[in-house]
Amino acid sequence: MTDDALPQDSDFPEFPEFPEFPDSPELSEFTDDMLEDKWVNLDLSRDWREDGPFDISEVDLDADDVERLDFGTLIITPFDQMKLQLNVVGNTQEVQAIIVTLGKSMLDLTLFAAPKSANMVAEVRSKVLEAGEAADAYTELVPGPFGTEIRQDVPVTLPNGKKSVQHIRIWLVQGPGWLLRGTIMGAAGSAEGVDAATADLYDFFCNVVVTRPEQPLAPGALIPMAAPEGLLPKQR
């Protein structure tokens, strides 16, 4: 992977001026229990992983000639005009997140351990909502392509000191023993459903294959990835 394949500062979207947010009726007119029942019921209403993301036990990757990148616990399928950035911990070469950029849109992939029998999506969603509240974000829950989708407008301060807002969409998908979080930012962060701005990122997310480590992991623990040989610069 050459340096010019990684996003530069100029590749990231420019955010609009910071708006005045109205109170969110989705979060203010319902009690916590009513809200949770509504969205939990949606999450459990069908198999939202029918078209992916997949567990390694559910697919046969040797059955085709598709070019993929294997990060150990996460296998991705690159697509045209995609730029790749890795969130690496210090000098450990341990990858904590994969960030895919397409034009002015970005998708951040992070993998966590989850119970094999119980669903923990609602618990994780609750923590995301708490973090959003702490950041003074405008938050709403909407039906999405993987069940309940979290949409947030998060106040940010730009390097020039101006106030702005970052539009974020969050997909939470649980498989056998794992939970994959997809965070969409930029142009696709303001889009609806899986329209043109989101279509390629949606397909990319669906094609992700998870290989959960065999060792026991506490629910919610981050599952690190390992970059394929030659993708990261060699340590000196």
Image (spheres, rainbow, N blue to C red):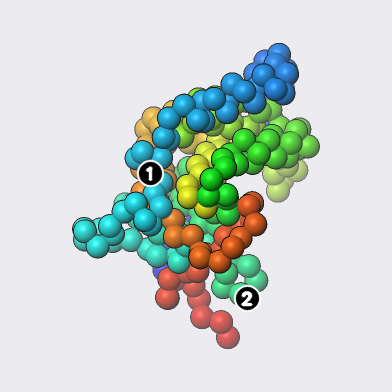
- Say which mark, if any, is on residue 52: 1
**Is residue 12 toward the left or the right of residue 24 in the image?**
left
The amino acid beneath tag 1 is Gly
In percent of width and height, residue 23 lies at 72, 18
Question: Element under label 2?
Answer: loop
Q: Is residue 115 visible?
A: yes
Instruction: Choose between 144 and 61: the one closer to the eye.
Output: 61
Q: Which residue is mark 2?
A: 91
* Crowding at mark 1 (Cα within 10 Å: few <14, some 14-19, many 20+): many
Which residue shows up at 28% across the image and 57% down it? Answer: 60
Residue 155, placed above or below residue 28: below
The amino acid beneath tag 2 is Asn
Quarter-wise, where is residue 131 in the image?
top right
Which residue shows up at 37% across the image and 32% down it? Answer: 196
In percent of width and height, residue 207 lies at 36, 49
Which residue shows up at 46% across the image and 34% down it? Answer: 146
Residue 171, placed above or below residue 30: below
Q: CA distance from mark 1 to mark 2?
A: 33 Å
**Is residue 163 toward the left or the right of residue 97 in the image?**
right
